[in-house]
Amino acid sequence: MTLRLFVLALLLAAAMGCGQRQERADLIFVNGAEPETLDPSIITGQPEGRIVNALFEGLTTFNAEGKSGPGMAESWTISEDGKTYTFKIRPEAKWSDGRQLTAQDFVESWKRTLSPETAASYNYQLFYVRNAQAFAEGKITDFSEVGVKAPDNGTLEVSLENPTPFFLDLCATPPLQPTPVETIKEFGDDWVKPSKMISNGAYVLEDWRINDRIRLRKNPHYWNTKNVALKSVEVLPISVATVAFNFYAGGLADLIVDKNLTPNALLDELNPATAAIPPRYVLDVSLRSSATPLAIQLNSTITRYNLALTAVYQLRDKATSNVLVSSAVQRISSYNVSRQPYADLVASQTAERRAAQEVATEIRTMLAVEFARMPAPT
């Protein structure tokens, strides 16, 4: 009798497990290492950044041409001296729980990022704001002296130390994205768990199983949700190249997006100098465009230090032309942005950057055609 009950219990558990299995996500990609956190203020790695940028959105966001455009702010004005930005928060901007997102949310979020107790590694991206560095270093303690104000719910005024031509680009990066400060106060570090996280981006955190997968679901309260093509996305934390390739080759993943996950045996074939098929280049993979079935959007990451290009190499069998592998590896282009003032680079629009933009436009078209030919996930 005891053995019979034990077997019955096993069968019941198996049946319950099968009943709870989720449908395949619209897009599944291998992301590299397990994220340490999904807190925009304190993330430091690319794997975290790829997820956070789907969950949260700043005043601006990068468009298909890799330029910063309207995000949570629908418009803005810049003073003649280039030191004062006035952002208008779009009326339809909301948190994922349906609450209105306001200018004050940005004030509180930037304060948290700059606060010494937060210990944000990238808080320096806010140091262009007047007195932000002094506050972060504890030289002043009154945050009202920092150059960010919310005169009303729909207006955010930012005063800079000096003219900063790339400030709108910075406004699209995680350290400047809004976070639900009241939720963080209530739950502490646990606020990033699926049952507690409140976000404002194209997706919400549906599930996070450590060393298994992260599942994102389309955010119905996102201001631009009608243009979010994918209803669900799964992120696989795999950090072993052979395992990542097996997931892709076996149809368990659609993309590999970490540069360190290219199998050594394929490096020669994926080398642009020796590859049988010329590589396709793209600056990033976004989850928001509705231009193609797999929602591929060109994006760029512009910082004070470098302009990074990401190459998506598609290796085809010479005999059958079947796609064998699609792995994303990061290729740092030698634009040497750090060797000259960034403001000069923006102002002059150097030949390298113009060339990069032209290549980006051409390759976005090539990639869209390539993915449009691929069958939809089954």
Image (cartoon, grey):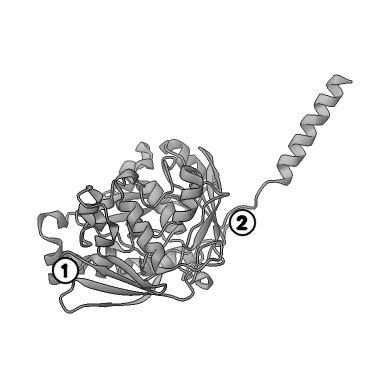
Nearer to me, 295 or 143: 143
Mark 2, residue position = 378
Q: How far apart are marks 2 and 1 (CA)?
A: 51 Å
Mark toward the viewer: 2 or 1: 1
Q: Does residue 136 appear to the left or right of 44 in the view shown?
A: left
**Is 35 situated above or below 357?**
above
Residue 281 shows in this picture: no
Residue type (three-letter) at the residue carrying disc 1? Pro
SS at circle 1 = loop
Q: Which of marks 2 and 1 is nearer the N terminus?
A: 1
Residue 362 is left or right of residue 180, and the answer is: left
Count of labels in the image? 2
The answer to whether residue 159 is seen in the rendering is yes
Q: Which residue is drawn at 33% across and 49% down?
A: 329
Looking at the picture, how far across and down is residue 302, in whole percent? 25, 60
Mark identifier at residue 163: 1
> Horizontal and vertical percent for residue 202?
48, 63
Q: Identify the amino acid type marked 2.
A: Thr
Q: What element carries label 2?
A: loop
Quadrant where the N terminus is found in the figure: top right
The residue nearer to you, when weighing 81 against 291, is 81
